[in-house]
Image: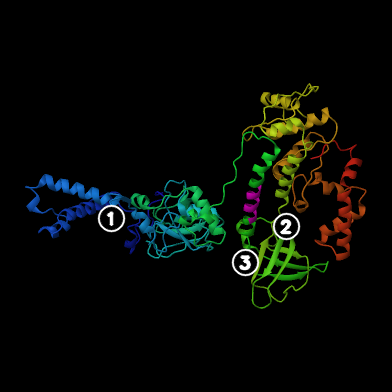
Amino acid sequence: MADKDVDPFAHLEGASSFSGVAPSSQAAPSSEYSYAESSATTSTTTGAAGGNSAKNGSKPHAHAHHHHQKADLDLDLAALDDLSLDQRNGNGQLVHRDDDEEEMDELPEHACAYCGVHNTSCVVKCMGCNKWFCNSRSLLSSSHIVLHLVRSRHKEVTLHAESPLGETTPECYNCGAKNVFLLGFIPAKGESVVVLLCRQPCAALPTSKDMVWDTSLWSPLIADRSFLSWLVKVPTEAEQLRARQISYHQINRLEELWKEGKAKATLEDLDRPDNNDEEPAGILLRYEDAYQYQNIFGPLVKIEADYDCKVKESQTQHNLVVRWDQGLNMKKIAWCTLPGLESGEVRLAVGDELKLRYEGELAPRWEGQGHVIKIPNNVSDEVAIELRRNDGVPEHCTHNFAADFVWKSTSFDRMQSAMKTFAVDEQSVSGFIYHKLLGHDVEPTSLRTSMPKRFSAPGLPELNHSQVSAVKSVLQKPLSLIQGPPGTGKTVTSATIVYQLSKMNPGPVLVCAPSNVAVDQLTEKIHATGLKVVRLTAKSREALGSSVDFLTLHEQVANNDHHTELQKLIQLKNEQGELSSNDERKYKALARTSSSSGPCLLMRLRRLLSLSV
């Protein structure tokens, strides 16, 4: 198969206009040299009799022999003067002359929003924001258009009207999909044309004899983080040298300004005082006390919370079509399809809060808050939102709705609260942990423990020498750090440590991890050792299935013999999908009672329970 960057349209009949897609490597240098020679010769013969011939590229004969050395000197001086970046003003002071800055003020509309390149063959328009970007990498690892598409999560582009392929939007020949990250091309059998197909499902369909293309030859339109050059040309070195040089940091700040609603923001706007946020204090290796620790990490957590809130607010879905229903509890239910959910731009779980808004003109402005009670599955792609209140719901309207994702600050509030407690309460942690967190030099402390004869835990793989050393070290120290690349058995080692701790000190052991997936994996491994495990989850995740559902607290409470009425209501809700208003009130009261008595329940189960996760 031919190289991906070769123009597949070069051999088409009547496609002579595409012949410039892959220019000769020798044409450009000779053209640039001719232009430079003609310009320099003209500057040395202004007003001379041979001026016209000089403009045509031939040197005047009158100066060819008698003033050969002087002409060469004048030529060099003229070239130097023409290339000079500095010139003197009226006061005799040197003034920097930046032609690129002057050109940037007069850039056409289709110029790259990052660097200013405006060659119509090298730029494409992002259909998500109507901004133009080029296929140049400059000093970055990806082309500007690909960087923007990834950063903004946009997926559709359009070529320029004056490009070799004209004003074209790449789309799948079969299904019409326009996601450029899924599109690729296939050479047609026996013809000098290519066919654009999406990777899934069209290119994955089995090839038949009647098809005019071979799907096994499918190649993506984006390769090595840039568009193929036959589709979008790469700017020449001269064009890239004249362009603005932009860094990843500047790109990120510019994209953030666009997300904040400043669609016309440019690179120059980054230097304005109102766009330059005060840099927070940097983290230290050592802190004087817990107050300094809180004063540094507190603003950092606040910045992260603000960013997370902006991301959540930017996920608003517009132009939704809603159909209305009423549940057994007499509450209004809005059914709709979220485009961002289908494309993977947003994530949704049962229990998430959404705010539904009406933006049309057939009814007064309305908004109502609710929570998700159903997410798309194999049967339906719709999302069900149960509203909290039924007041003023525009049931007669079905179009022009929008859904806002409600941001919750719970996790960030807990971080701030923990740091505040750490700063004001001296008894919140042990002295050893206190000084270790602040980076102080603390003498190593060893715990007096009776080491087991066998370190490997039942139900888990045998530990190797380094894993045994890690387990032995952790059991003897109050604080330990285990590091290792993927696949080295950190989860098995951690589960073994928990098993040995539970045997050495009977009683509950709290195990935490930074993600739900990690907690599920640890729960599964610890359960394999024969220990009794309780998996604690957020209420919003109780409806999500996992491999350790039977170990979760809500499942163990529901299956407990002491809550028969709650068990019946849970079974009824699972069968019907919802409860009546009376049953729902009873269900919430029983669930609240079981939750509030959770510690008491765990105390009653302590004889059977030796581990809490």
Residue at mark 3:
318
Whether residue 143 is visible, yes or no, is yes
Q: Secondary structure at mark 1?
A: loop
Q: Nearer the viewer, residue 593 or 87?
A: 87
Which percent across, then down, holds residue 289?
A: 69, 36
Q: Amino acid at mark 2?
A: Asp
* Quarter of the figure with the C terminus: top right
Distance Cα–Cα, label 1 vs label 2: 68 Å
Q: CA distance from mark 2 to mark 3?
A: 18 Å
Question: Which numbered marker is on residue 161?
Answer: none
Mark 3 or 1: in front is: 1
**Magenta region, mostly helix, strand or loop?**
helix
Residue with the mark numbered 1: 90
User: Residue 582: within the magenta?
Assistant: no
Q: Is residue 205 above or below residue 469?
A: below
Give the amino acid at mark 3. His
Determine the CA span between mark 3 and mark 1: 58 Å
- Badge 3 or badge 1: first in the primary sequence: 1
Contact flag, marks 1 and 2 (Cβ < 8 Å): no
* Horizontal arrangement in the rendering, residue 334 relative to residue 313 (left or right): right
Q: Which residue is mark 2?
A: 352
**Label 3 SS:** strand
Q: Where residue 261 sits in the image (x, y, percent)?
A: 56, 62
